[in-house]
Structure formats: structure tokens, C-alpha cells
Image (cartoon, rainbow, N blue to C red):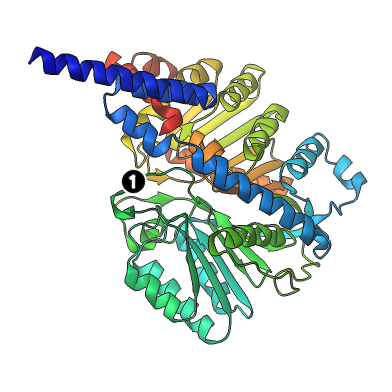
Amino acid sequence: MSIDFSFWTLFYFLSSLIFGIIILLEKKHPVKALAYLAAVFLLPVAGILLYLFFGRDYRKRKLFSRKGTVDARQISQWKAGISFLAPNVDASFIQSMVPYDKIIRLLYSNDHSVLTTNNACNLLRNGEQLFPALFADCRRAKHHIHLEFFIVEEGSIATELAGILLERAAAGVSVRFIYDDIGSRKLSDHYISRLRQGGILMCPFMPVRFVRFTDKVNYRDHRKIVIIDGKIAYTGGINISDRYDNRLKNKVFWRDTQLRIVGDAVLSFQLRFLLNWQFVSGNRCSVTPEFFPDTSGEAVLPMQVIAGGPDYDQPGIVDMYASAIALATRRIALTTPYFVPPEVIQRALIAAALSGVEVEMIVPYRSDSRMLDWANRAFFDDMIEAGVKIYYYKKGFIHSKTMVVDDFFCTIGTTNLDYRSFDIDFEINAVIYSHSFSVELMKDFCADKENSVLIDKNAWKSRTLVHRFAESVARLLGPVL
């Protein structure tokens, strides 16, 4: 027995040492490297498996660096045929938006994210407002419907959508559908085959073998986008699933936020969709007026669309959040289902609170992951101590991803405030510069506070040692969750 024990002890030690050296040589971000090192040395076997499944960056280095190069080349080629890709807003207009002109220029430098002004937006609350509007727009489509979703889950919503798409495809409308192979792992072959046989072009994003036995794999397409005829776009936190629609009387009330956009900003969503379509299908779409129509004549609502993913050299979405937080002078209102932020975001929020800015954040009391709940809370100590007000949403699960700064700047999209959204997955956000729209979003935030409970500073300090320990362990593993 002692010989066997010694052998396996030595084997574990040498394996951990080898994988530890590999992690260090990969030159990951220090926080992520420490998280993986802790997992490898503290979790026998499981830590090594965690790293092998989620920590290896070879796909990112090879596949996504190539995708980023191809995308940049494609954008350069399209610039001649798509006028909106040039920064066509008068420089004096941008200068009038001081201090947010810095963010405008930053996003253009990072992501060719042009500022468009001819836009109008509708704020849609929960699936019960989104799906009727979305389905009505899809039924009116004349040329194309482009869809990109992390989760497509069979049920009433997916069935109704399939019927609409099949009807429009039969009428000659081109339908392209990207679904993430992990997020939509429960989607049946029958559902996919039915749509394909009806003329709908369906492509999984980064197919994974044995997908039904896989929980999470890195580099997923977490975007939720619909573009209709190049004139209407939708984005936000809502996927295609019954759980997002409270009319269907689910066990948990689902609180979410979505945007319906018309105007020039739709063309930015179209561009990002077509680049991902080219990646998953291998087929390029020609730049035609039908894909990039003239959308002038809408209301004046300045907006940029910022995308992120492992194919980007610069962390544009992180930079956007950090810059906007740093510019705040009065208040910041954040809503996120997961809060496992990189240090730059946490420090920016703490600095804002210490400087006198009112910083408020709403998170779920219970999310869909117990481990992530512990990880979320591990970041609360310094935040609460600095004066950040953190609210637990108690009515159900809040899944909105929003931020309002000084009632002028706001962002809504697919990005959670965690490492996975900022560094690993493909995300997209709308960035809006508008007092009236920010005030409307702020009203929603205040309404959500009515269904939330403020974490009491004294009560938080008195939580048990067991809770503190669980939070500390979860925080250590936060970057790899």
C-alpha cells in the first residue's frame, strides 16, 4: 500500500509541476495564471482536467488570430463599398460630446466602431415584450433575416420562431442562423433538419464533439443578434427559450433587457454578423444595397456598436466600461447577472465611489450557478467598504446587462461583468449617448431596485467564516469559471 501511495503521490506532484510550468510558459494574464495554478495544485486530477478543457489557448492563438486577420482585411475591402465604415460624423459634433468624445475615438480605434446618429431605439423589458415585437418584424421581412444566438432551446418560443422563418424562407426571404454549439447543446437534430430542409441556412458556432456531455467550453458565441432587411436590429440578454418569457408561467421570474434599433447602427450589427457568418460557414456575402440599405431619416440618437472576442487584439469592451466609469461625476448604475470582474473594472468602480460618485449595482440574489454566486460575493468586500451600494434582486433572476453613467451615457448588450465575457467569449454591446434614453433606462433600474434588497454593510461584515471561505475559494477560481 505504501509503495502505491508513494507512486501516485510522486505522479501527482510531477504532473502538477509539468502543467504548472506549461501555464507559466503560456504567459497568460497573471490573475488567470494564478487561478489555473491554484486549480492544478489544489484540486487533484480535477484541476488538471479543468485546465485541459478550459485553459488551453492553442485554438485562440491559431484559429482566432487568423480570423482577426481575415476580418480586418475584409473590413478594409468593404470600406470602399460601405460608406458608413468611415468616420463620417462631423468632428465638431464629436467635440460637442466632451468628455465622451474620448470613448467615441477609443471605440473607433479598437473596433472600427463608427458613431452613427440617425437612430431610434425601443427598450424592451423581458421576453413578453421582446418576442411579440421580434416575431412581428420577422413576419414583415422582405429580403433577409439574420439571427445569431448563444442559446436556442426548444419550446413554444422556438417553435413559433421556426414557423415564421420557414414561412418567410418559402416566400423567398434569405434566412441565415448562427447558433452556439454549446449554448444550444439541447437543440434536437429534428429541429435543425426541419429548418434546413425549409431552405434556412443554419450553422453551429465552433462545433464541439460529444456536445451533450459538455457543460462549458471556452470561446463561445455569447451574442444575441437579429437583423431584418438591414433596417432593424435587436440585441440584449434574451435568447430563444421559453425561460425568458414570463407569460409562459415559468418557475422563476426572468428579468431581462433588450433593444430594438432602427437606423444606421443596424449596419454595424450587420457587419459583425456577416464576419461571423463568413467564419462559421466559409461563405462570403457580397456587399449589396440589400444588406446595407440607406437608413437615413431616423431620429437623432448617437450610438456605437462595440464587439469583443478572442479574435480582437485590444479588449475594446473592457476599455469602454473602464473609460465610462472613470468619466463619471455623479452616478453609475450597473445591472449584471455575474460579477467576477477584472481588476481594472473593480478598481474603477471603487475609485469612483471613493471620489463621491454614487455607484449602485443590482445582482441576482440567486443566479443559475451556485459557484458563481460565491464568486460574485467574493468581490463585494472592498466595494461595500468603498461605499458602493449593492442590491440583491429578489423577485426572480435578473439577467440584464446594462450600465448608465450620469444620465447621458448608457450601454446595453450581451456582456456580463466577468472574465468570460471580457476575455473569452464573443460579445456585442450598443453604446448610446443620450440624456432621454439614459433616463428611461435609469427608470428601469430604479424599478428593479424596488424588487431588490440593499446589502447592509454591518450584516455583510458579520457573515460566517464558512461563507467567507467559500467566497475566497470561488474568487481564486473566478477567472476560470
Is the residue 51 above or below the residue 241 in the image? Answer: above
Q: Is residue 134 left or right of residue 295?
A: left
Dividing the picture into quadrants, the one containing residue 103 is top right
Q: 472 or 377: which is nearer to us?
A: 472
Dividing the picture into quadrants, the one containing residue 439 is top right
Q: Is residue 237 left or right of residue 432?
A: left
Residue 295 at least partly seen: yes
Q: Position of residue 318 (x, y in %)?
A: 62, 35
Q: Is residue 302 left or right of residue 411?
A: right
Residue at the spot of label 1: 215
Residue at (40% x, 51% y) in the render: 254
Q: What kind of element bears circle 1? A: loop
Q: Position of residue 106 (x, y in %)?
A: 76, 38
Q: Position of residue 230 (x, y in %)?
A: 68, 69
Circle 1 crowding by C-alpha within 10 Å: few under 14, some 14–19, many from 20: few
Amino acid, disc 1: Asp
Q: Position of residue 421 (x, y in %)?
A: 52, 40
Is the residue 297 above or below the residue 102 in the image? Answer: below
Residue at (62% x, 50% y) in the render: 67
- Location of the N terminus by quadrant is top left
Is the residue 160 above or below the residue 122 in the image? Answer: below
- Location of the C terminus by quadrant is top left
Residue at (90% x, 50% y) in the render: 90
Q: 260 or 32: which is nearer to us?
A: 32
